[in-house]
């Protein structure tokens, strides 16, 4: 997000205040010296004009100080000069400082500053024998209200900018979580299958080397599937890259979906997990986001079975209707250690936490529990609304 450029300043004072102060001082002193402004004695009115012009320098950094100094200078001239400053330049100074008090101070402090300025101006008007108190109140109050409105607008703009920054940080955090979840699903599944098949290949090599071919083929297939998924994930991250192939020339595969479930089941069967699969997803196409969520949840559930329960009999049901997709993964009791069983039950670890987040993000639900025979069951339901079809 681009930063807002800071206004130019001279010795920390905004350039606009410096220019306005110099202009007001020059015009005031010039008018007094040329006689266009008939305020005497000059020994008093010239210093007062300088003080009034200089008070504008405090409009932004110390508005109360500037307002107090200008008010005091006006009162001094009214008392000892028998005439309050009445030029156009003195009126400009008063209005600018009233605006500065309203714009630069909190509500209570700004109101107190206005009261001080009104009291000083009423006093000079009384000493000068005038009666324009309503006019003084209107002009000071109007400038002060404009300053308060400017302060309120800046406050709202600042809050809106902070809100946008918070939203940007939240979006980045959510995107990081999504990427981490994708990486976990891709890497954890493939590495789990590779680890199991590597153990099987090692055991086969020790007994009958000819039987190591199947586990090695499963390892190769899992590694290739992981590479495809990683290329797809990197393609999503490269927002500035167009075309149908990645920079290395590999064709981009579509996101995983329901059509990939048979190959996922076949790969886990080759890895040694006996799966009874019932895939009834129908012919109605679903949004790619829902299909990816279903695929990843099934992948995570079956990977957990293989990792924590071992090669136990597993039942997979994926049923899609016009309103929802329901998937059930149920496995019998395995040989997992207690800590692994706790992970499978979803009370620790990150796998089923990510699967539950996927279901919730798609507007569905996911529950997991132990079965009476000591196995484990996971049930996820993802709705398909009219707007999704």
Image (cartoon, rainbow, N blue to C red):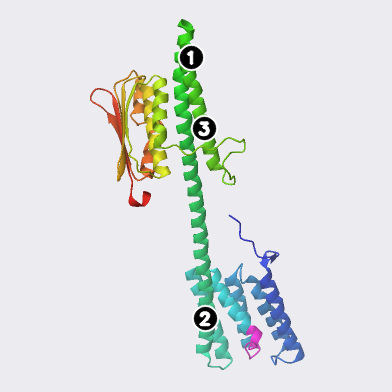
Q: Quadrant of residue 197?
A: top left
Q: Nearer the viewer, residue 23 or 215?
A: 215
- For residue 363, above or below residue 303: below
Q: Which residue is mark 2?
A: 142
Q: Is residue 46 left or right of residue 164?
A: right
- Per the image, label 1 sits on a secondary structure element best described as helix
Residue 286: numbered disc: none
Q: Which residue is farthest right? A: 34
- Among the two numbered marks 2 and 3 on one chain, the one whose residue lies closer to the N terminus: 2
Q: Residue at x 71, y 79 (%)?
A: 23
Q: Which residue is mark 3?
A: 228
Q: Position of residue 114 (x, y in %)?
A: 52, 77
Quadrant location, the N terminus: bottom right
- Among the two numbered marks 3 and 1 on one chain, the one whose residue lies closer to the N terminus: 1
Q: Which residue is mark 1?
A: 213
Q: Position of residue 284 (x, y in %)?
A: 35, 43
Q: Which residue is farthest top? A: 207
- For residue 230, above or below residue 80: above
- Per the image, label 3 sits on a secondary structure element best described as helix
Q: Quadrant of residue 34?
A: bottom right
Alpha carbon of mark 2 to alpha carbon of mark 3: how far?
A: 68 Å
- Disc tally is 3
Alpha carbon of mark 1 to alpha carbon of mark 2: how far?
A: 89 Å
CB under 8 Å between discs 3 and 1: no
């Amino acid at each position: 997000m681009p930063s807002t450029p800071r206004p130019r300043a001279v010795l920390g004072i905004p350039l606009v205040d410096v220019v306005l102060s110099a202009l007001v001082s020059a015009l005031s002193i010039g008018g007094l010296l040329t006689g266009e402004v008939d305020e005497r004695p000059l020994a008093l009115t010239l210093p007062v004009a300088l003080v009034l012009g200089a008070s504008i320098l405090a409009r932004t950094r110390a508005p109360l100080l500037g307002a107090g100094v200008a008010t005091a200078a006006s009162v001094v001239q009214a008392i000892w000069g028998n005439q309050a400053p009445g030029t156009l330049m003195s009126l400009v100074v008063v209005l600018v400082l009233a605006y500065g008090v309203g714009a630069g101070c909190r509500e209570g402090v700004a109101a107190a500053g206005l009261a001080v300025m009104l009291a000083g101006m009423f006093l000079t008007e009384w000493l000068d024998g005038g009666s324009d108190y309503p006019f003084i109140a209107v002009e000071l109050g109007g400038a002060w209200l404009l300053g308060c409105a400017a302060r309120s607008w800046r406050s709202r703009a600042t809050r809106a900018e902070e809100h946008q920054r918070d939203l940007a940080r939240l979006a980045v955090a959510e995107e990081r979580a999504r990427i981490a979840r994708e990486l976990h699903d891709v890497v954890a599944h493939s590495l789990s299958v590779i680890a199991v098949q590597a153990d099987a290949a090692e055991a086969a090599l020790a007994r009958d080397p000819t039987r190591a071919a199947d586990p090695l083929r499963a390892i190769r297939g899992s590694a290739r599937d992981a590479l495809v998924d990683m290329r797809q994930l990197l393609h999503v991250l490269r927002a500035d890259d167009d075309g149908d192939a990645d920079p290395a020339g590999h064709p981009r595969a579509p996101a995983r979906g329901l059509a990939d479930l048979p190959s996922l089941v076949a790969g886990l069967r080759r890895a040694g997990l006996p799966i009874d699969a019932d895939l009834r997803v129908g012919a109605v196409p679903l949004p790619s986001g829902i299909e990816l969520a279903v695929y990843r949840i099934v992948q995570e559930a079956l990977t957990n079975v293989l990792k924590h329960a071992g090669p136990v009999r597993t039942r997979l049901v994926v049923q899609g209707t016009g309103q929802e997709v329901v998937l059930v993964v149920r496995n019998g009791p395995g040989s997992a250690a207690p800590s692994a069983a706790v992970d499978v039950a979803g009370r620790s670890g990150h796998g089923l936490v990510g699967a539950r987040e996927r279901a919730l993000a798609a507007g569905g639900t996911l529950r997991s529990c132990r079965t009476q025979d000591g196995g484990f069951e996971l049930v996820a339901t993802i709705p398909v609304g009219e707007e999704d079809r």
